[in-house]
Image: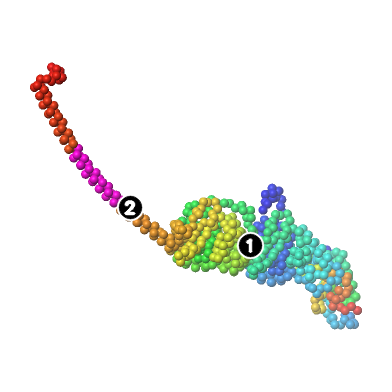
Amino acid sequence: MSPADKENDIQILIENNGSEDQIPEGHVLRLFVTGSTPRSLRAITNLKAICEEHLAGRYTLEVVDLYQQPELAKQNNLIAAPTLIKSLPDPIRRVIGDMSDEDQVLLGLDVQPE
Amino acid sequence: MIQAPDLVLPRRTLKKALTGIEGFDEVTSGGLPQGRPSLVCGSAGCGKTLFAMEFLVRGAVEFGEPGVFVAFEETEKDLVENVASLGFDLQDLVDQKLLALDHITVDRSQGEAGEYDLEGLFVRLGFAIDSIGAKRIVLDTLETLFGGLENDAMLRSELQRLFRWLKEKGITAVITAERGDGLLTRQGLEEYVSDCVILLDHRVSDQVSTRRLRIVKYRGSLHGTNEYPFLIDEDGITVMPLTSTSLDHDTLVERVPTGVEELDQMLSGLGLYRGSSVLLSGTSGTGKSSLAAHFAHATCARGERCLYFAFEESPSQIVRNMASIGLDLKKHLDSDHLRIVSARPSHYGLEMHLATMLKEIKRFSPHSVIIDPITTFIAVGSASDSQAMLIRLVDLLKERGITAYFTSLTQGNRELEATEVGMSSLMDTWLFVRAMETDGERNRLLYVLKSRGMAHSNQVREFLITSCGIRLADVYLGPQGVLTGSARMAREEKERSEALACEQQSKKDRILSERRATAIEAQIAALHAELAAEKLELQQSEDERSGVVLEQTASREAMARSRGHLNGPATELP
């Protein structure tokens, strides 16, 4: 039942120089968690770390607590929790788990590890 | 079935939720365990989804319990379309908030980065349940999850948790699963759903498919362990319980005439028992259907209803044919006392036939039922299947006190009475019609092979189909047994002429003897006359003689007196 910290939810898209120019609009990410379980919190922390490392300034992350908005489970066809949905850039990808496997997360984000 | 001990136990039995599926609630004595998950498993195409859907739809419509259908395989649109053919309007139920549909797909391309659980599914189900206040839920087919998620151990523990969660919510759940090799389900779901497990099966033997249902397990409830055939038709699923295995139906003592007077006389003069089953067997063309039609006619004429299942002829054909032997079935059809249902036996399997018959019987509630002929079913199923079906049918009719009349076609070249032993043991009365070829003729014979609970004739009677219906001719015994046809007629003629001759002869004899008597009487009269004459003559001569004696005495006395030496009398003289 812990609403994620609102101020951390949305990251302003920040321009960056370098090799990732092919992603002009940045990543639009939504992480669905169920309450403030250790697993949920771990997922948020892990994902943020990965994004900061690889997509710093070029992503939007929204953390949704399914307990607060249960109707979103059906709308987004969710089964597992936590689930990360990358709606932009195409294609839409999903990653489930506590985001502890960085390689899998990057694969899901279509980000080449450096 | 052992029911007595069960009745003694305190009836604190678990609550059940009626499914509304025809026959199933009877088999389970009340439906599925309420507030608990039940597992419905079976191979592809065996009717799991339909079973589950009917459980929900009937629950919503008939019992006012809203339900959630969670489909892992079909989309919502597909579901709505698929069951529309069965008369279920899902969209309408959804609009009325009696039903919620949810299609769940598992994205196989999704990555798995670390630990997760199925809390998303729980949230989703919980939301769907709460949105309509559902009392029932279906998860069809839950095992699909195993294909989409890699972490088997997590999945198993989560499913376990899911079933526990459903139970805590007090929701009656149906979980469907595919049948696995050597296991009831591919993933061994039966380990988690331990309250009620139902197995559906779809077998094809001899090109005829049969669906069967078996209750593998039903914790805390008495249930039948048999395989119950079921079918899917436009009204959904119908399970055929093997009714009254205990043979405890009431026996009726009332008698009903067969419609053929002479036949009633053979059956101790009163006809059949009401609610009994009669088998009429015979080779083809022996008049089985005609006899059946008499039975129908007699039933309707009493003002009762008769249901006629014809598997060889169409209703109009029967009406036409029976009109030719003087039976007006049309008027009974018009007055709704008679209903003829025609179907080709090969149209569907035995169970389907049984179910259709059952439906018709329920709808029409007849006093008597005719099945003409029962033997065609042997062509549809195996011998044991058709016998099982027959047992169910006979029991069903007995239970309702319906007099049943089965005709059975015997193959001419077989042992006539032996072939149907399996069938005949179910029957109370067995009539046998046989054709006999003699003197270049084919004549029909009828006899009562058995008739339980009544004195019945042991005679073999000739059976005539006339333009005024069926008659049984009187018996004429010849050196070779019963005389039939022209032999009988010749015998009848002979007896008639013999009787005539006999009568004439006796008339002649009477005249002759009368004449003789007259003659004798005449003779007697003559003799009497002679005797009288003789007597007269004798009298006369007697008289004459006594006159002479008197005269002689008188003259002698006179003489003596005159001579004076008459002493005796003279001294006595005064």
Task: Determine the secondary structure under disc 1.
Answer: helix
In terms of depth relative to the viewer, which is nearer, A38 or B12? B12
B468 to the left or right of B14: left
Q: Answer above or below: position of B14 versus A74.
A: above
In terms of depth relative to the viewer, which is nearer, B328 or B132? B328
B95 to the left or right of B297: right
Asked where in the image residue B113 lies, by quadrant, the reply is: bottom right
Check disc 2 and report the residue beneath it. B506
Which residues are the magenta region? Answer: B510-535
Q: Which chain contains the residue that carries disc 1?
A: B
In terms of depth relative to the viewer, which is nearer, B114 or B412? B412
Task: Determine the secondary structure under disc 2.
Answer: helix
Q: Answer above or below: position of B42 versus A27.
A: above
Residue drawn where x is 52% and y is 54% of the image: B272
Taking the view exactly as shown, the residue that stands out farthest to the left is B562
Residue drawn where x is 49% and y is 52% of the image: B268
Which secondary structure is most common in the magenta stretch?
helix
B60 to the left or right of A57: left
**For the residues marked 1 and 2, what is the alpha-carbon distance in whole angstroms?**
66 Å
In percent of width and height, residue A53 lies at 90, 75
Q: Is residue B527 magenta?
A: yes
Q: What's the residue type where badge 2 is placed?
A: Ser
Q: Answer above or below: position of B549 versus A60.
A: above
Check disc 1 and report the residue beneath it. B384
Residue drawn where x is 9% and y is 21% of the image: B563
In percent of width and height, residue B217 lies at 73, 58
